[in-house]
Image (spheres, rainbow, N blue to C red):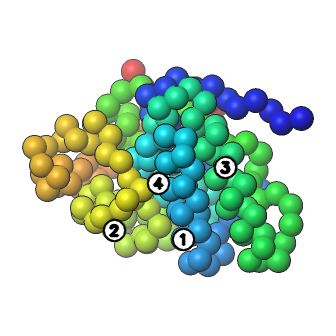
C-alpha cells in the first residue's frame, strides 16, 4: 500500500536531497540530465512547486523549492521519480529502484539561510572537485541566478528579488555572495537539517 504524501507547510522553502541507491550514479550521460530536468519541469508545474535552485550531481540531487500547497512537494517528487526512473531504466536496460529510499528535506526559515542554501547547492560541484568555479558546471542553476542565463525552470524567490532593483543588479549581488561562501557552521547546520528533517534558520 502506498505511503501517504508527506505534508509540509505551503509557501515555506524546502531544501530537498535525493541520493542514488547504494551511492550508485543516477546520471550516466547528458541525456539523463536533460531527461531529469524535463521531468522536474513537468512535475513542478503540475503540482505548483517553484524551483529556485538545483544541482544535479553524479549520484544525488539538490533542489531548493517552495511548494504552494501542503502536499505539493511530495506529489512532485513522486511523479518526478516515476517519470525519470522509468526512462532511465529503459535507456540503460535495467530494472528496479534508482533512489535510496524517500527524499530528505528541511524547511528554510530565514532569508540568510535561504541564500546560504543556494550557495551550498550551487557550490556542490566545486566542493566535490568536479569544477573550479560554479559557472563551469553545466547541471546547476548558478548560471541563471548569478549570470542571468534564461532558464524556464527557475522561479526567483522573493529573497533573490530583494537583492537589487533589477535583474542585473540582483545577479551581481548574488555573485558577490559566492566570493566568500558559507561558514563551516552554516554548512554543518544545512547538512544536519536535511538529514534529520529539521528546519534550519535562527
| Residue 69 visible somewhere in the drawing | yes
Where does label 3 land, which residue?
Answer: 79
- Near mark 4 (Cα within 10 A), the count class, few <14, some 14-19 or many ≥20, is many
Residue at the (18%, 49%) spot, across then down: 170
Q: Which residue is mark 2?
A: 135
**In contact (CB < 8 Å): disc 2 and disc 1:** no
Label 4 and label 1: CA atoms lie apart by 13 Å
The residue located at (36%, 48%) in the rendering is: 155
Q: Of the residues tagged 2 and 3, which is closer to the observer? A: 3
The local secondary structure at tag 3 comes to helix
C-alpha distance separating marks 2 and 3: 29 Å
- Judged by depth in the image, the label closer to the viewer, 2 or 4, is 4
Task: Give whichever of discs 2 and 3 has the lower sequence position.
Answer: 3
Under circle 2, the secondary element is helix
Which is nearer the N-term, disc 4 or disc 1?
1
Q: Position of residue 46 (x, y in %)?
A: 54, 46
Name the mark nearer the viewer: 3 or 1.
3
> Can the viewer see residue 199?
no
**Residue holding disc 4:** 54
The quarter of the rendered structure image containing the N terminus is top right
Q: Which residue is mark 1?
A: 34
Mark 3 and mark 1: Cα distance apart in space: 16 Å
Asked if residue 158 is positioned above or below residue 180 in the image, the reply reads above
Contact check, label 2 and label 4, Cβ < 8 Å: no
Most extreme residue toward the front, as rendered? 46
Label 2 neighbour load within 10 Å: few <14, some 14-19, many 20+:
some
Q: Nearer the viewer, mark 2 or mark 1?
A: 1
Report whether 144 appears left or right of 130: left
Q: Secondary structure at mark 4?
A: strand
- Between the residue at mark 2 and the residue at mark 4, the CA separation in whole angstroms equals 13 Å
Total numbered badges shown on the rendered structure: 4
Amino acid at each position: 500500500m502506498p505511503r501517504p504524501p508527506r505534508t509540509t507547510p505551503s509557501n515555506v522553502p524546502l531544501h530537498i536531497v535525493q541520493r542514488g541507491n547504494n551511492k550508485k550514479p543516477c546520471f550516466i550521460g547528458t541525456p539523463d540530465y536533460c531527461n531529469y530536468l524535463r521531468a522536474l519541469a513537468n512535475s513542478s508545474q503540475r503540482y505548483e512547486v517553484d524551483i529556485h535552485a538545483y544541482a544535479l550531481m553524479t549520484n544525488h540531487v539538490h533542489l531548493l523549492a517552495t511548494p504552494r500547497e501542503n502536499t505539493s512537494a511530495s506529489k512532485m517528487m513522486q511523479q518526478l521519480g516515476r517519470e525519470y526512473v522509468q526512462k532511465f531504466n529503459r535507456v540503460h536496460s535495467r530494472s528496479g529502484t534508482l533512489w535510496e529510499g524517500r527524499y530528505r528535506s528541511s524547511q528554510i526559515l530565514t532569508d540568510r539561510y535561504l541564500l546560504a542554501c543556494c550557495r551550498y547547492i550551487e557550490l556542490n560541484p566545486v566542493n566535490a572537485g568536479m569544477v573550479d568555479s560554479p559557472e563551469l558546471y553545466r547541471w546547476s542553476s548558478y548560471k541563471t541566478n548569478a549570470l542571468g542565463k534564461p532558464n524556464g525552470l527557475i522561479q526567483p524567490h522573493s529573497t533573490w528579488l530583494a537583492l537589487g532593483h533589477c535583474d542585473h543588479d540582483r545577479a551581481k549581488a548574488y555573485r558577490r555572495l559566492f566570493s566568500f561562501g558559507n561558514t563551516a557552521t552554516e554548512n554543518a547546520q544545512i547538512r544536519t537539517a536535511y538529514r534529520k528533517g529539521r528546519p534550519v534558520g535562527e
